[in-house]
Amino acid sequence: MEVQWRRVSDDPAEIDALASVLDERERERAARRSNPARYIVAHALLRTCSGDALGVDPSAVEFVRTCATCGSHRHGKPALVGTGLSVSLSYAGRLAVVARSWGGEVGVDVEEVDETDFDGFNAVTLDPSEAPALEGLSGADLRCARARVWARKESVLKATGHGLVVDPRQVVVSGPADPAALVAWHGEHPLPGPVQLADLDLGDASHVAGVAVLADEPVAVRVVSA
């Protein structure tokens, strides 16, 4: 499995060049965003990463989105039907991240650490059994721990295709100081299969990231800067 990451550029010429590989629908969606650069960089990275794996031009890659819970094609995880390749993307702050896997459905998530600095985080994110692992932490340590837990949960929900249709409190992961693992799944929708989970080092202390893959055994993760 490979994870590629890229910083979001402030250079309009670079953003325009990246937008040229997107399809018309993606460019329209980018234009509706308050920060189109992040969307453009992430989706261009998704296309180049996928195109490289499939041996095709990035602009020729065709994605199908299908919601795992309602079946709609208007939203959901991007899929490359009939290729055997699973992909996932995420972006936050100044980073965009894409994961690709030939060995099972993959989900990746990146979080900006400071975005976890709000009252009520535990109430909307954690199962009661997870709260003790964050007790005694404060300041930057607490924010980083929260972001790591959140990235693990999101990556699992992206791998399964459920997204936030499943309450993140129902996805129980290991404590932030422990190796990444899915501890329990309490979601109403069944878990599609065994989940392997890993934290990612993107070389940026202001962000944390995680990746999950639906596989029976742990998989090696290669992280590269695109």
Image: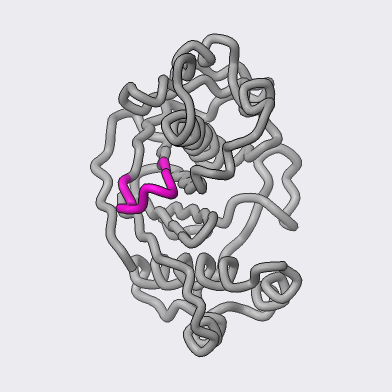
Position of residue 216 in the picture relative to residue 126 (left or right): left
Is 205 in the magenta? yes
Work out whether residue 116 or residue 219 is closer to the camera in this orientation and state it: 116
Work out whether residue 82 or residue 161 is closer to the camera in this orientation and state it: 161
Is 9 in the magenta? no
Position of residue 68 in the picture relative to residue 100 (left or right): right
Q: Which residue is drawn at 67% across and 80% down?
A: 24
Q: Residue at x 49, y 83 (%)?
A: 11
| Dominant SS in magenta | loop
Position of residue 203 in the picture relative to residue 162 (left or right): left
Figure check: 188 above or below 26: above
Q: Quadrant of the C terminus?
A: bottom left
Q: Quadrant of residue 56?
A: bottom left
The answer to whether residue 156 of the structure is visible from this angle is no
What's drawn in magenta, residue-wise? 201-210
**x, y (%) of residue 214?**
42, 35
Q: Residue at x 70, y 37 (%)?
A: 69
Work out whether residue 63 or residue 220 is closer to the camera in this orientation and state it: 220
Q: What color scheme is it?
A: one colour
